[in-house]
Amino acid sequence: MKRLWAPWRLQYIENSADKKDGDCPLCSIPASEPPADKSPATIPDAPASTLLLYKGHFVSVIMNRYPYSNGHLMVSPLAHTANLDSLSAESSAELFAMIKTSVNILKKSLNPEGLNIGMNLGKAAGAGIDEHMHTHIVPRWSGDSNFMPVISEVRVMPEHLQTTYSKLKPLFELL
Ligand SMILES: [Zn+2]
């Protein structure tokens, strides 16, 4: 765990997180919490270990445990599908609405200078969890790629993730 911000780590992490048969993190993490409208912000602490920020009717928002940058989120449908075509109109609408909401929350709380938003569909495109589509949202700052060599000896600090989680979670709970 040396190069915290290296992009290829994305794939490594997702692969290693996803290796048990039938155990898809993008299904199992949201399944650990009832839908938002059935749990009126009652469990602020419980999901911290899963880094689940939000669960709606059709989509979830989860912090990437092995981020490309601080505040790296994944917005994914609750349905286990690799196929964009299989998303219903409601689910597509909620997915895009949550991308917009997440961007607004990230802008407000982390003040990034830019953001990358994208999907890797299929292993060949670099998807780590290729059977469950998800959208990456990666906050960016000028020079953050130049920053990489400087911190190449730094280890991923769980506290770092928890700090960001604590900053973001209350804003998602307001939704
Ligand atoms: Zn899944």
Image (cartoon, rainbow, N blue to C red):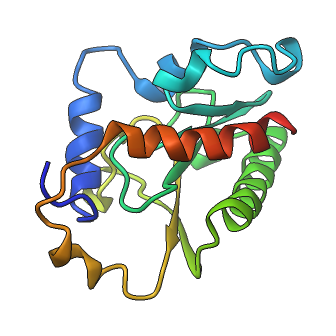
Q: Residue at x 58, y 80 (%)?
A: 114
User: Which quadrant would residue 32 be assigned to in this image?
Assistant: top right
1 lies left or right of 21: left
User: Which quadrant would residue 78 be assigned to in this image?
Assistant: top right
Q: Residue at x 46, y 36 (%)?
A: 132
Task: Tell me residue 67's x, y (percent).
Answer: 37, 52
149 lies left or right of 58: left
25, 119: nearer the viewer? 25
65 lies left or right of 39: left
Task: Tell me residue 110's x, y (percent).
Answer: 61, 64
Task: Tell me residue 11's x, y (percent).
Answer: 25, 50
Task: Tell me residue 135's x, y (percent).
Answer: 54, 53
Q: Residue at x 55, y 38 (%)?
A: 62
Q: Residue at x 34, y 14 (%)?
A: 22
> The C terminus lies in which quarter of the figure?
top right
User: How many circles with numbers are drawn on the protein?
Assistant: 0
Is residue 20 in view from this perspective?
yes
42, 58: nearer the viewer? 42
As displayed, is residue 34 above or below residue 114? above
As displayed, is residue 16 above or below residue 122? above
As displayed, is residue 20 above or below residue 63? above
Is residue 83 in view from this perspective?
no
